[in-house]
Image (cartoon, helix red, strand yellow):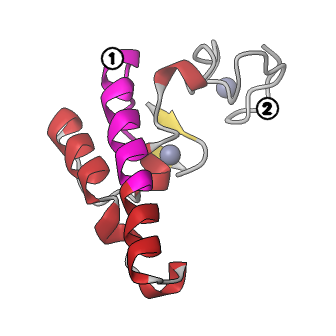
Amino acid sequence: MWCWRCKSEVPMLNEEEYARIQTLYGDSMKATKEFRQEHGLTLEQISMDERFKPVVNEYEKITGVSGFHHNAIMHHRIALFGDPCQYCGKPLRTLNAKLCAGCGKPK
Ligand SMILES: [Zn+2]
Ligand SMILES: [Zn+2]
């Protein structure tokens, strides 16, 4: 599916897959916070990429695609996007978008 944020075709997650990713994301977020408090570290002192590795790994397991940033993965949820444009086939940016961002035609 076309992602207008990444400006490329990316694998999108259905609700069931997204729930798994979201759980991992929440866990990573919590673990990062605890780790920082425990060691008195600032955000700059820790590797966020390292901390959110489970999210990236799970996405790779589901889609077979690696190399995405965890923040990018979080918006690769089918339910976040509108229907595909009837002219160019790219999904509309939001559920109630009036114009297609891909070709500029009204819905
Ligand atoms: Zn994207
Ligand atoms: Zn279009």
What residue is shown at x 39% (from left), y 41% (from top)? 10
What residue is shown at x 83% (from left), y 18% (from top)? 106
For the residues carrying marks 2 and 1, which lies nearer the camera in this image?
1
In terms of secondary structure, where does tag 2 sit?
loop
Name the residue nearer the viewer: 12 or 57: 57
Residue 47 percent location from the top left of the image: 37, 77
Residue labelled 2 has its Cβ within 8 Å of some atom of ligand 2 = yes
**Tag shown at residue 54:** none
**Tag shown at residue 16:** 1
Secondary structure mostly taken by the magenta-highlighted segment of the chain: helix
Q: Of callouts 2 and 1, which one flags the residue occurring earlier in the amino acid sequence? A: 1
**Tag shown at residue 104:** 2
Name the residue nearer the viewer: 99 or 15: 15
In terms of secondary structure, where does tag 1 sit?
helix
Residue 57 percent location from the top left of the image: 20, 50
What residue is shown at x 79% (from left), y 32% (from top)? 104
Q: Which residues are magenta?
A: 10-30
Tell me the amino acid under the disc marked 1: Glu
Q: Is residue 29 magenta?
A: yes
Q: Is residue 18 above or below residue 84?
A: below
Q: Quadrant of residue 107?
A: top right
